[in-house]
Structures are given as C-alpha cells and as structure tokens.
Image (tube, rainbow, N blue to C red):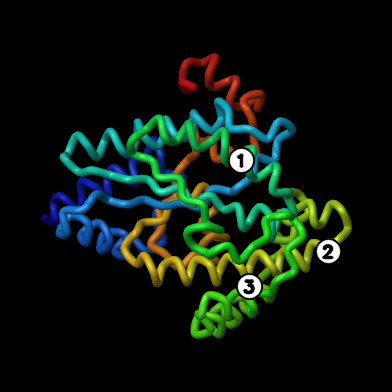
Amino acid sequence: MINKIEEVYKILTARKIRRAWPSHPEKVKENIKYFLDSGQPLILTTTWLGVKTTEKGIADKADKAVLLFLKRNIVNELEKIDVKCIIKLLYADSNASYLEGYSKERIELYWNTLKPLTDSFSCFRLVRLNTEFWPNIFKLDGEEDITVEEIAEKMKSLDILEETKRRAEEIFKNPLFETFKTWAGKHSLLVKKGIFTTEEIAKRYVYFRIFGLLLYSKKFPYEIYFSYTNPELNELIISQPTIYIFSIYKGFSDCPWFIDENHEGLIRLIKMGKVNA
C-alpha cells in the first residue's frame, strides 16, 4: 500500500504539472491512503470561478485546454496504475456575485457553456456552489449585502466563525494582504464601480474564502484540493491538503475564467503543438 500511495503522489506532483510542492505532503498522502483503502475513486477538487470575466463570457478553448491538461496528466496517468479519479470543479457562482459583482445573466452564460464541455468527459463533476453547498443563500445578482456572520448563521456553522475571524485578522496584518487588495482592484466590478474599496472587497474575500473552505473541509475531509495560485498566498486561506499545478502547460498558470482563446500565451502554445484545444 505504501508504494501505491507514493505512486499516486508522484503523479499528482509530477514535474510537468507541478507549480510548487505541497506545503503539507503527509496530509496529501493521508488522504490518498483513505481513498485507496476505501476503494473509492480519488477525488481532486478545486474552486472554479462562476463567471468568465472576458468580453464574450463563454467557455471556450481556454477552458477546454485546462480540462484536457487535467485529464491527460492526472486522470489518464492514474488509470495506468489502476486508480480511478474524479475531478470536482466547484462552480463558484456565489463568489462571482458576492466578491466580483457579476450579474446572474453572466453567471448563467458561463455555466450554460461550461457544463456541456465538462459533461463531455466522464471524469469531471461540475458542482454549483450556491445550489449544492450554500443552499441558495446568495441572490446571484451582483448586489449581495449579506455578511459572513449572517452566512454562518444561515449555515448553522457559528462554530467556524471564530476561527475564520482569527485567521482573517492575522492575514490583514500580513504584508501579503496587499496582494489581495491588488486582486480586488483588478477583478472585482464592485471595486471598479466604486461601490466598495479594494480593502473592503479584499477583506470580504478573505473572510468568505476562509469560512467557505473551512466548512467544505469539515463536510468533505478527504478530498484533495488543487490550486493554480501561488502557495504562499494560498496557504493563508486554504484548509485542505493541497497540490499546486499549472493550468494548461508547464510554466502557464493563468486561470481559465480570466482568459479566453485569444490569449497570447495560449495561442502560442497551440501553434507550437504543446496544447490541444
């Protein structure tokens, strides 16, 4: 069994897909062991923003390239050692509205074009967070006014709120908090429209992400999270055992919801024959 765990871990952290080493490799291996012992398919999970921020707002070759990268380098490689894998994509429609300020129309547009794409591969499970995790707490109109305290009360998870606030306050004092403010200014329509400041949205992001991931890890403790983000920032937020991978090709970490098929880097990789989409 130990050798099998190491084989799986080697595939999940292979040089061709690894953006960075996991910060807690033993926790990742413990979760691999759980799935191997139980005979269930290994579940890898990531948060997928519930809106395409590019002009057309639809799933396209960029999204397909990411899915193919995951299937080719993780799912297919695990199949070679007789390990089945399911990749859960948590469609964060809640984040798109609550943090980014996007309308329901834009959220639905991306969902309706992404869902057929993920359904064309048997290994992916696209999960709507506001329906299946938050039980319709959010209006998804881009004008949410609910607080993390109210969310915790609705979710009957006030026990998680104290830890959320403690960790959030530590982040606010950390120099890296400036990066979250930069992200807020770059991506959130709530900031661009002058409704909130970068600091207000950055704090909302930190509170909400910590709370949501703590709650998710409590409900699904054995899933292995994967991320495209810099681990130095991610480890401030994420609770789950996490692996860090490239999104489309070694050295390429742009998230598909922030780029489209006209992205210069993606076009170059396609022309070089390094990416199929």
Q: Are marks 3 and 2 in contact (CB under 8 Å)?
A: no
Residue 254 can be seen, yes or no? no
Q: Are marks 2 and 1 in contact (CB under 8 Å)?
A: no
- Amino acid type of the residue tagged 2 in the rendering: Thr
Closest to the observer, 71 or 216: 216
Nearest to the eye among marks 3 and 2: give it: 2
Location of mark 3 (residue):
171
- Amino acid type of the residue tagged 3 in the rendering: Ile
State the SS at label 3: helix
Using the rendered view, name the quadrant where residue 106 is placed: top right
39 relative to 235, above or below: above
Residue at coordinates 35% horizontally, 31% vertically from top-left?
A: 72
State the SS at label 1: helix
**Which labelled disc corresponds to residue 27?**
none
In the image, residue 233 lies at what x, y percent? 57, 60
Give how far apart the Cα atoms at labels 3 and 2 are. 18 Å
Give how far apart the Cα atoms at labels 2 and 1 are. 23 Å
Nearest to the eye among marks 1 and 3: give it: 1
Residue at coordinates 63% horizontally, 73% vertically from top-left?
A: 171
Location of mark 1 (residue):
257
Q: Residues within 10 Å of mark 3 (few under 14, many from 20)?
A: many
Residue at coordinates 16% horizontally, 40% vertically from top-left?
A: 82
Location of mark 2 (residue):
197
In the image, residue 164 lies at what x, y percent? 56, 78
In this rendering, position of residue 206 left or right of residue 79: right
The quarter of the picture where the N terminus appears is bottom left
